[in-house]
Image (spheres, rainbow, N blue to C red):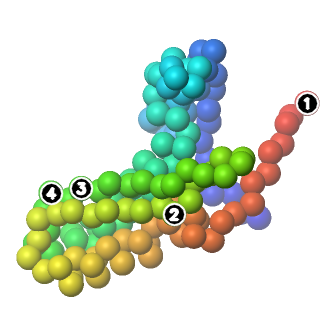
Amino acid sequence: MSRGPSVTVRQVGPSTGEGFVRGHSQLIDRPESKGGADRGPMGGELILLGLGGCFMSNLLAAIREREAPVSNVELIVSARSEGTPARMTDFEIRVSAEHNDPTFMRKLATIAERGCIVSNTLKQGSSISVIVED
């Protein structure tokens, strides 16, 4: 199997990890109400950011490639949290922007969704292997 993207997460506090990807870093923590120090978003919130960031990147590329008159794009990404064990379901991306053609804007959003590796992954599901090294 070919390996794809990879990140590293290291402990930097009792409840805090720091994630590294390329030249970037991000603190990951729990809110104080869940026993954390609230030094960064929780992992589940990062899933939402990842989905929103991936969708936004693809949407902006589609707009740019078509020289579409679209500006001030904003996304609100949410999901339902449910079940035991807890999991996120029913992801939703709300797109707002300044544009003059709602039909074309919906087409651009469809193009972005189809090109987004995160939305494609979440739709299909995937296996997760946890390997504890000796």
The answer to whether 21 is drawn above or below residue 105 in the figure is above
Q: CA distance from mark 1 to mark 4?
A: 50 Å
Mark toward the viewer: 2 or 3: 2
User: What percent of the width, then of the height, locates residue 74?
Assistant: 24, 56
Q: Which residue is mark 3?
A: 74
Q: CA distance from mark 1 to mark 3?
A: 45 Å
Position of 52 compared to 70: left or right? right
Q: Which residue is mark 4?
A: 72
In terms of secondary structure, where does tag 2 sit?
Answer: strand
Q: Which residue is mark 1?
A: 134
Q: CA distance from mark 4 to mark 2?
A: 26 Å
In terms of secondary structure, where does tag 4 sit?
Answer: strand
Check disc 1 and give the amino acid type.
Asp
Q: CA distance from mark 2 to mark 1?
A: 38 Å
Marked residue nearer the N-terminal end (2 or 3): 3
| Label 2 environment density (alpha carbons within 10 Å; few <14, some 14–19, many ≥20) | few
Marked residue nearer the N-terminal end (4 or 2): 4
Residue drawn 61% across and 32% down? 9
Check disc 3 and give the amino acid type.
Glu
Q: How many marks?
A: 4
Residue drawn 66% across and 66% down? 125
| Label 3 environment density (alpha carbons within 10 Å; few <14, some 14–19, many ≥20) | some
